Amino acid sequence: MSIRKLLLGDEAIALGAIHAGLSGVYAYPGTPSTEITEFIQKDPVARERGIHSRWCTNEKTAMEAALGMSYAGKRALVCMKHVGMNVCADAFVNSAVTGVNGGLVVLAADDPSMHSSQNEQDSRFYAKFAMVPVFEPSNQQEAYDMVAKAFTLSEELKTPVLMRVVTRLAHSRAAVELGEAHAENDFRPSEDRGWVLLPAIARRQYVKLIEKQPQMEEASAWSAFNRLEKEDADLGVVACGIAYNYVKEALSADPARKASILKLSQYPLPAGALRELAASCREILVVEDGQPVVEQDVKALLGAGYPVRGRLTGDLPRTGELDPDSVAASLGVKGAAGLPAAKTLAARPPQLCPGCGHRDVYKALNEVAAEYPGARIFGDIGCYTLGALPPFRALASCVDMGASITMAKGAADAGLFPAIAVIGDSTFTHSGMTGLLDAVNDGSPLTVVISDNLTTAMTGGQDSAGTSKYEAICTGLGVDPAHVRVVVPTPTNIPEITRILREEIAYKGVSVIIPRRECMQTLKRKKK
């Protein structure tokens, strides 16, 4: 008797990995990928088996730890949002050269439309860069089924595999039919010297990677997740991942509109199926969520003389995620007016929670910064980024994880005074420590505020890697202990915080102020 469960796309991936014989998941929380690791942490089978599921300090450490588990012969999953691929890129690209032992699947959750992100980058470019296979599910059932296939292909080809999902699939639910759970791999550490990437060895390993490309293409050509649905039609559609659903929905609304469809959920691009589609049609529309990765490949494969439409031609929006209406319009579906436009409502931007300690930090910072005409406060990634919005409008920048300290240092090097960096506790251990070390080594006149709410609050309250260690970390990196100050951010303590801020701004060196008070959301959950 088959078992069906209603699962988020993220949960389907997590359960698929457990059932595929997973031994460890390595991740740093980031929307829309966070729920994968959280599901594994709570799953009874994962707990019974002792599957490793602790959060990592950042995506690079996650990728490298997973590669170590693969080296030992076990199956490992790495999870991150798309910008996390930038952090782990060194290890990810080189893992394609070392190859793998146990199956290694890298899950990248992309965020078209930037619902909770700084950019719309498409992780499929990283797979092309590293020359590894990609799986891109079109629904939750495929998300569940693909994980096992991805681990199997990883072990067959001795290569990491990228699995890419987008926000709509990660955070929507559907019924998923479950298969049986398989045992974990045996412990069998690699004996291959190809893991030592000295130049002479790396050159040989790179040749092996090139030689695997035809096998990857063949795997795509025969994949059950790719299929050609032919109609007597002038239009051919290449529908990638979740976009396949939008195409089918649009065409079902207008029976007179016919199109042949190449459903694409495994890469590299299956060249034979694409040529067969092109031969039966006069033009091709490429529908993909994210950037025009496949559209560019289709153009290159078919040549300049074959008409290919998509995001590059303006037939689909160049930015933002796809939706049924934009896809229907690109297909020329009649009557695709979509839902009526919503009434214009007053904007309600997000705000820091009532009672949040970050509020008191920004109130004190703004009060002190107003005393210095040239003051700038450099921000970072976290819920405290909301300090850039009203009512505080405190931040001059927020670029990427850890950039507050290094940007403030660079500005101080240029003569800016005072230069103040605000960074969260989790972000500091993720990628702020090295910037602080640079500032210490240069003796930069810099004031760093590590706003510590004892959790990774923005993504739901996961453990923060440096909890109870921040003073020791800062002094260990060389900050004078006399200039590592801890305060409690409450309204009644604002006079004390402003006094300490003035003292540390006046100090001609690196100082660190740590406002520490528990996140209101985690506190509420504990009280319940």
Image: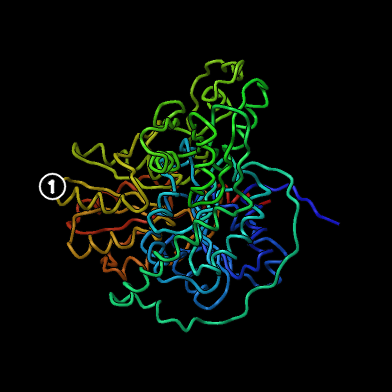
Looking at the image, which is closer to me, 304 or 345? 304
Residue at screen point 39% across, 32% down: 312
Residue at screen point 28% across, 59% down: 435
Q: Position of residue 504 (x, y in %)?
A: 25, 54
Q: Position of residue 470 (x, y in %)?
A: 39, 64
Looking at the image, which is closer to me, 192 or 448? 192
Residue furthest right in the image? 1
Regarding residue 496, the answer to whether it shows in the image is no
| Left or right: 503, with 72 as reference point | left
Regarding residue 267, the answer to whether it shows in the image is yes
| Left or right: 388, with 103 as reference point | left
Q: Secondary structure at mark 1?
A: loop
Point out the image quarter for the N terminus.
bottom right
| Left or right: 350, with 381 as reference point | right
Residue furthest bottom in the image? 191
Residue at screen point 76% across, 50% down: 5
Q: What amino acid type is highlighted by mark number 1?
A: Gly
The image quadrant that residue 311 belongs to is top left
- Residue on which the image places disc 1: 415
Looking at the image, which is closer to me, 279 or 408? 279
Residue at screen point 29% across, 67% down: 481
| Left or right: 17, with 457 as reference point | right
- Classify mark 1: residues with Cα within 10 Å, few (<14), some (14-19) or many (20+): few
The number of callouts visible is 1
Looking at the image, which is closer to me, 263 or 321? 263
The image shows residue 337, relative to residue 54, as above or below, that is above
Q: Position of residue 97 (x, y in %)?
A: 39, 68
Residue furthest left in the image? 415
